[in-house]
Image (tube, rainbow, N blue to C red):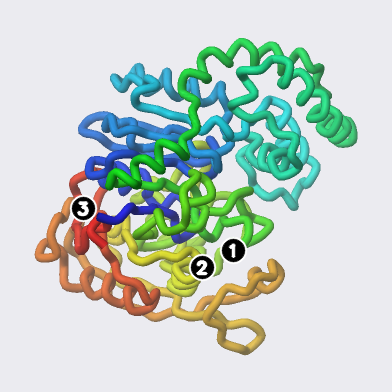
Amino acid sequence: MANVAVIGAQWGDEGKGKVVDWLASRADMVVRFQGGHNAGHTLVVGDRTFKLSLLPAGVVRGTLSIIGNGVVIDPWALLKEIGIVGEQGVKITPDVLRIAENAALILPVHQRVDRAREEARGARKIGTTGRGIGPAYEDKVARRAIRVCDLAHPEVLDAKLDELLLHHNALLRGLGAEPFAKAEILDPLLEVAPRILPFAEAVWERLDAARRGGKRILFEGAQGIMLDVDHGTYPFVTSSNCVAGMAAVGSGVGPSAVGTVLGICKAYTTRVGSGPFPTELTDAIGERIGDRGREFGTVTGRRRRCGWFDAVMVRQAIKVGGITGIALTKLDVLDGLAELRVCTGYMLDGQELHRLPASPSLQARVSPIYETMPGWSETTSGARTWAALPAAAIKYVRRIEELIECPVTLLSTSPERDDTIMVRDPFAD
């Protein structure tokens, strides 16, 4: 049986939480491998709705869940999230959750730097969540990060904070923001350490043993490939890699262990924050899609920009992301529209393109080439078989498969976990 990696095939917010939750019941463990608490997954379980940011989606079902080394962790945000889901009846203990000892931490100084830089950018802001994700990844690459394992050694924390604050306080002063005293960070870290360390371990050893023992591993990604720091719409991207290859790097397993790669995308397109969006709709149809799809960010609460399905972008994400099958979500949001449009190419300076160019200036200038298809008046909400779908909806899905050059293996028709049509079992590939 194959392991499965779940990644976003658009700009994030594709409905990965529901899909991971649906797959987690068939997995032995779930591993979150990149991002931070800037990502949000919403899970609907019966009459309860869980909003997760750092916790892998498997915790809701009691599946062993792992936060990998590719994730940057705000320890206070993690403990707050553990407390919130605990109040909803899900107790998080070290038997359920494990954290990579070599994962980097997000500190209060990272958040202050993040917000100060965005404010300084003014109209050119990137649209970060202000949660310190980018600065934390920068420290990791610059080899000055505080890691989970450092929490067990106060003398190490003390020395490493000197170097870290030497850099960040100079930056904060330059931006006109208040610098940090070391005690403002060291004391809270020493206080939180006993609550975090019981979850910490060398998770790569656990994953290696699971792989050799034939266990099913579900790798859970955050954001989406078009927010990937290398392959996305740079600089309007996140600070980590969102492609399938990161599942191996960010959890401590070899590439051969990743297995099937399931890309999640909506039956239309959304984006939060700044950056290019060729198929964006600023009319009543875009407003309708946003309202019906409840398109508000799980973490930020910001309203998402909405547009038609962009087959060019998704096909590109499939190629660079290593995706072998697509889970198409929110088909029911399109119910009742008389006609639908799908972007099949771009026009740029009189030439037709079938890829999104890397240059931000060119991305901003492309215009979509649309193919128009009939919509359907019947409802698809709650459908669990192909036979329950209108013929026009099936035709729409099949045309998307042709354009993105990848099969739809799962089809989601509502936020409810069981309102899912499985075309092919991802774990069986």
The amino acid pointed to by label 2 is: Val
Q: Nearer the viewer, residue 98 or 35?
A: 98
The circle drawn on residue 348 is none
Q: Secondary structure at mark 1?
A: loop
For mark 3, what is the residue? 420
Label 1 and label 3: CA atoms lie apart by 30 Å
Q: Earlier in the sequence, mark 2 or mark 3?
A: 2
For mark 1, what is the residue? 231
181 is higher (above) or lower (below) than 333 = above
Question: Pointer 2: residues within 10 angstroms few (<14), some, or many (20+)?
Answer: few
The x and y percentages for residue 330 are 31, 55
Q: Earlier in the sequence, mark 1 or mark 3?
A: 1
For mark 2, what is the residue? 320
The x and y percentages for residue 108 are 68, 25
Which quarter of the figure has residue 424?
A: bottom left
415 is higher (above) or lower (below) than 199 = below
The amino acid pointed to by label 3 is: Thr
Q: Nearer the viewer, residue 206 or 259?
A: 206
User: Is mark 2 in CB contact (under 8 Å) with mark 1?
Assistant: yes
The amino acid pointed to by label 1 is: His
Residue at the spot 28% in from the left edge and 29% down from the top edge: 62
Q: Is residue 232 visible?
A: yes
Residue at the spot 50% in from the left edge and 49% down from the top edge: 223
